[in-house]
Image (tube, helix red, strand yellow):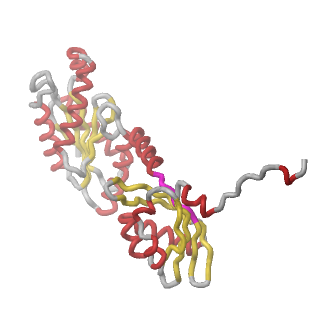
Amino acid sequence: MPVNDIDAPEQVSADHLVPHIPGVIFQFHRARNGHMRFPYLEGGGVALKHIDRELLAENAGQLVEQLTGNDHPKIMSAIERSARWMLPLTTRFRLPFPKEKPHWIAVSAKPTPVDDGVQWNGIMMDISDQVGEEQRLRKLCDTDPLTQLPNRRKLMMHLTHVASLSTRHGTPLSIMMIDIDHFKRLNDRWGHLHGDDVLKQLATHTQSLLRCEDMVARLGGEEFMVVLPLTPLQQCHALADRLRQAISVHDFGMGPGQVTLSIGVAEYRCGEPLTSLIERADQALYSAKDVGRDCVCHIR
């Protein structure tokens, strides 16, 4: 069969295709004096409806700062790194939308040196669904499913971070180790479902009594830990006793006084291993159990 008799596929021009892609194709130019502009910016989606493309084609500096908000320093750092080393530009930022949550935008572009600076050719994609799924999975990894408190993994990451800050700045840091007294007896008498409800109520009540910078996490079973940055031992002890008293009079559906706490507190010693800090709080907790429960103890 002659080649000319075969039906050739319809040719599609780039101008027809670009408006329908799920992203934005762009050309970004930064002059040696720092002046920035987008000579080309086309694509699909809703992002371009809320952007002044004519302004971006002339002078993008101020508008980029407004659009990227708190992410602006990160964006500029990525641009600078890409320009200096001629590396691909890969970053993400939050783009505000009128009457909607900000959309997460991923940027991928290749730099090319030009006479008066650097020019990038690349694409921007809306990855809001992907970021939402990442956040959901991260929360699952970091959250105790019963109480919705941070779990042990999240707690240790946070404790490592605040201990590093404490060492660097010489600021106090204390922790509470909390255990519900006779929890097995409570489960046996009232049932495990009621025991789960006690754990959930305790989590909510404890959070309400702490400061926003404090973290309470569930270690497992009936054990919890509270991390208190910028808090010396004496203040931690007072906060723990206030929490103990509040729980002892709270009605968990069995009458006041049915749920009590034993709490061990300890203050971080600059540079010590976190295992040592936790062990001292544990020892203080066992001391609270030994002297009769429903009390707070510390070991210096």
Residue 16: say if magenta. no
Residue occupying the point 31% across, 36% down: 148
What's the residue at 34%, 53% (across, down)? Answer: 100
Q: Position of residue 103 (x, y in %)?
A: 41, 55
Q: Is residue 4 visible?
A: yes
Residue 175 vs residue 73, the one in the foreground: 73
Seen in the picture, residue 292 relative to 266 is either above or below; the reply is above
Where on the picture, by quarter, is residue 85? bottom right
Residue located farthest toward the right when viewing the structure as drawn: 1
Looking at the image, the residue that sits furthest to the top is: 189
Residue 225, compared with residue 14, is above or below; it is above
Q: Residue at x 56, y 55 (%)?
A: 21
Which corner quadrant of the image does residue 262 belong to?
A: top left
Asked whether 111 or 168 is in front, the reply is: 111
Vertical side of 222 occupied by 74: above or below = below
Direction front: furthest residue: 5
Left or right side of 3 for 121: left
**What x and y, as percent, mark residue 228?**
24, 49
Q: Residue 87: tell me if it is visible.
A: no
Please state which of residues 251 and 94 is positioned toward the viewer in this rendering: 94
Instruction: Name the dominant secondary structure of the magenta segment.
Output: strand
Q: Which of the two residues, 274 or 184, is positioned nearer the viewer here?
A: 184
Residue 178 on image: x %, y %: 24, 35
Q: How many marks?
A: 0
Image x and y of residue 11, in percent:
70, 57
Q: Which residues are magenta?
A: 122-127
Q: Is residue 265 left or right of residue 23?
A: left
Q: Residue at x 13, y 45 (%)?
A: 238
Q: Quadrant of residue 221?
A: top left
